Amino acid sequence: MPDYQYLIVGGGMAADAALRGIRELDPVGTVGMVSAEPHPPYNRPPLSKGLWKGQSVDEIWRHADDLAAEVHLGHRIVALDLERSQATDEQGQVYGFEKVLLATGSTPRRFPFGGTDILYYRTYDDYRHLRALAQHAESFAVIGGGFIGSEMAAALRFANKRVTLIFPEGGIGARLFPADLARFLVDFYREKGVEVRPGEGVVGLERQGQDLNLQLQSGQTLTVQGVVAGIGVFPSIELAQQAGLRVEDGIVVNELGQTDAPNVYAAGDVARFYNPALQDWMRVEHEDHANTHGLTVGRNMAGAHEPYHHLPFFYSDLFELGYEAVGILDSRLETVSDWKDPFREGVVYYLEEGRVRGVLLWNTWGKVDAARALIAEQGPFRPQDLKGRLE
């Protein structure tokens, strides 16, 4: 039985960052990483961004094997025995540990139809599959107008494919952006050659040879050669539940990344943590959090005792438009838009009872730290107080 001082369950960005955090303080302690993926850790954002614009695949690998860890690929941990300090994978292999990190990430939501004909885009193998399909297929449907859907529609247009973007909301990014910005993006994507169908749902799929026939809620049928879906994710908490750990929309951790079992930690997408600036609990599914939280929790596993008070940011590229965002972006909050050039450059503030809860930096760069500082202020703010605040 392999036995480690530190066992990392998962092989994503948070897992890799935690390994680096451990090694910063403990260069010799034994570390095992068990990942269900067949590939070593890699950066995920290029899968829907840079790799479609000419970035080399060679650049995405994080080289965890350089850090003196035993990496077990293609193995999924299915049971955690905290009394014996052991984890068991689906093949029956048992791993002993002194401390264990759960970096199990998140799982895509799926339709009850379509099976493998719908690609729930998330992994490097998903990228390879879609790239191979795009070599001969010409028309694609992208289901979902959120983060993944908007990026993948743009990526497939970069590959000169016919793309239909389908989502039930009234605009692209409608759950994040103010209604006027979400509606602008519909027209913007149409100008880029994407057929956009807001207010539309998908209720079925049938294969006919190389064609896929999507049945739409409106009663229409859309025929394409490929279907990509980004309809949300949920945290992969099954292992934590089986072990009896506290779970509330993720694995609840303290400021050090510890669960309610002191030798069990959680990091990245799956972790629910308290943020002092927002004075609220949150769970974040983006790169900055995976890297910073993973690193901090790894260091804490090795004895650092460093609280995680970082307020993560996330970013996206939508053709030539791009944004960075900090805090809570929820279109149900009060929003104050401060445009230099309407819908092309500016800042959107998200307020709740006069306090700034989130900031959208739309084609506005170098202001993430200033946005974090503004969110940490108590306020209250009036809309006029925010005009020009982050220019």
Image (cartoon, rainbow, N blue to C red):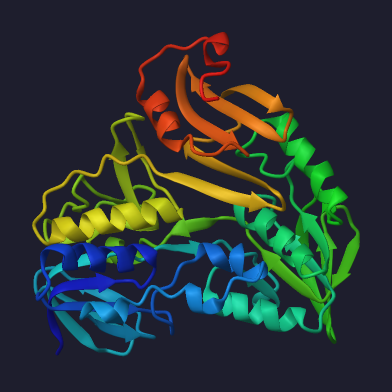
Please state the horizontal and vertical placement of residue 238, each as a whole percent of the image: 35, 65
- Residue 217's place in the image compared with 364, above or below, is below
Percent across and percent down for residue 270 are 36, 57
Residue 175 location, quadrant: top right
Position above or below: 363 against 89: above
Q: Is residue 292 above or below residue 332?
A: below
Which quadrant: the N terminus? bottom left
Residue drawn 72% across the image and 53% down it: 319
| Residue at the (89%, 64%) spot, across then down | 221
Q: Residue 42, position in %: x, y? A: 43, 72
Q: Position of residue 272 (x, y in %)?
A: 33, 47
Instruction: Specify whether residue 136 is in view.
Output: yes
Q: Nearer the viewer, residue 297 or 102?
A: 297
Q: Nearer the viewer, residue 192 or 78?
A: 192
Mark yes or no: residue 333 visible.
no
The residue depicted at 24 percent of the width and 49 percent of the height is 253
Q: Is 312 on the left-hand or right-hand side of 67?
A: right
Farthest residue to the right: give it: 220
Depth check: 36 or 318 in front? 318
Left or right: 106, with 189 as reference point: left
- Number of on-image labels: 0
Q: Quadrant of the C terminus?
A: top right
- Residue displayed at 29% across by 58% down: 294
